[in-house]
Every structure is written in structure tokens, then in C-alpha cells.
Amino acid sequence: HPPGRPLGCPYKWGDFPWSGVITQRQGGGGARGGPAGGRVFRGHFRHTTDPKGRLSIPARFREALDGDLGDKLVVVPIDHALEVYPLSAWRDIEAKVAALPKFDEDARKFKYAYLSRAQDVSLDAQGRIQLSSDYRERAGLDKDVIVIGMLDHFEVCDPDRYAHVGDPRGA
């Protein structure tokens, strides 16, 4: 195992920034398993949705969206959360699925179960996105939510759900 690297990890500690929530990796991303374009969504934030279902995106996440297609996002419901992808990252997923054999049964199931549920949304002038009432209901979202960075996208979930599933402190 090479010095300066955690056991089983191909990267050195210095490969990763030690501060900040969002970074633009040197030399672009994707080459070593990072998100395409090198933009990273990291951390979690408590937020609220307003009565119309609008969610203010954390400022640090909005910074990562600056640039190419930054105001265009895709929302997909999964289990008890909503995944939110920058349009460029979503197009990468679509390209990978499009490269699969057209009549492959697993690929078709994935298209029906996941891709077909995607909704396009845009950031408004205040940095908010509109979450449809149907999707908020599916994910069990009320007013209070947690916005969780997941590297190439972020998730929006109920704080109680996060406490049981993702919070390493268990609370």
C-alpha cells in the first residue's frame, strides 16, 4: 500500500481539498471517479420549502452550478428523497444509458423506473427550485428538509429520514 494513502484507496490525502464545501478539482473531473466537470456537492444543510414548494438551494451548491447550464436542473424521486442533478451531469447519465443495448431488459426497466420520472426545473432569480407537490409527497417532504451533497448531485430529504439513514452521529 503506497505511503500517504488510506488503506485500499488509490488517492493520496493531498488529492482532496481540506476546506470548503464545493471545489473545482484541478485538471477537471471524471478521470479518477470524480464527477464530470470536477464540480462537487459536499456537506449537508438544513433548509425549508415555502408554501408553494420552492426550495432555496444552499449558496455553496449554487456556486457549483455557475457556468455551463448552471440554472438547469433535473429532479428525480428515489425512495424517500429527491435527487437533484445539474443538467450536464444528468446528460452524462442519459448518454451512459443510451449506450446500453436497446432491448436489454435491465436497461429498459431502469428507463421506466428512473429516467422516465425525471423533471426539468430551473433556478429562479432567488436561487430556488420548484419541487412539485407530487414529488414532495412521494418523498415525504414537509416544510423542513435536509439538502445533502452527493458529489455529482444532491439529495433533498426529510430531516427525520436523514437522522435514521445518513447522519453519522445518529441524530
Image: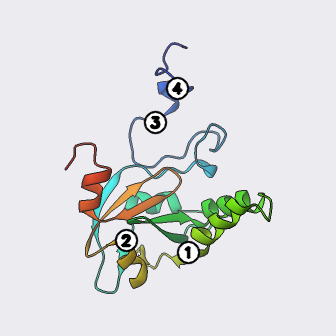
**Residue lying farthest front?**
105
The answer to whether any part of residue 132 appears in the image is no
Secondary element at tag 1: helix
Mark 4 to mark 3 CA distance (whole Å) = 16 Å
Q: Report the front residue among 68 and 110.
A: 110
Against 31, residue 150 (above or below) is below
Given residues 5 and 57, the one toward you in this image is: 5
Above/below status of 74 relative to 100: below
The residue positioned 47% from the left and 20% from the top of the image is 7
Q: Is residue 64 left or right of residue 28?
A: left
Q: Which mark is residue 117?
A: 1
Residue occupied by mark 4: 9
The residue at which mark 2 appears reads as 139
How far is mark 2 from mark 1, CA to CA?
A: 13 Å
Q: In the image, which is nearer the foreground, mark 1 or mark 3?
A: 1
Within 10 Å of disc 4 (Cα), the crowding (few <14, some 14-19, many 20+) is few
Disc sitting over residue 17 in the figure: 3
Measured in 3D between alpha carbons, the distance from the residue under mark 1 to the one under mark 3, in whole angstroms, is 34 Å
Tell me, for residue 55, which label it has, or none: none
Q: Amino acid at mark 2?
A: Ala
What amino acid is found at the position of numbered circle 1 in the picture? Arg
The answer to the question of whether label 4 and label 3 lie on touching residues, with beta carbons closer than 8 A, is: no
Query: What residue is drawn where x is 54% and y is 51%?
Result: 39
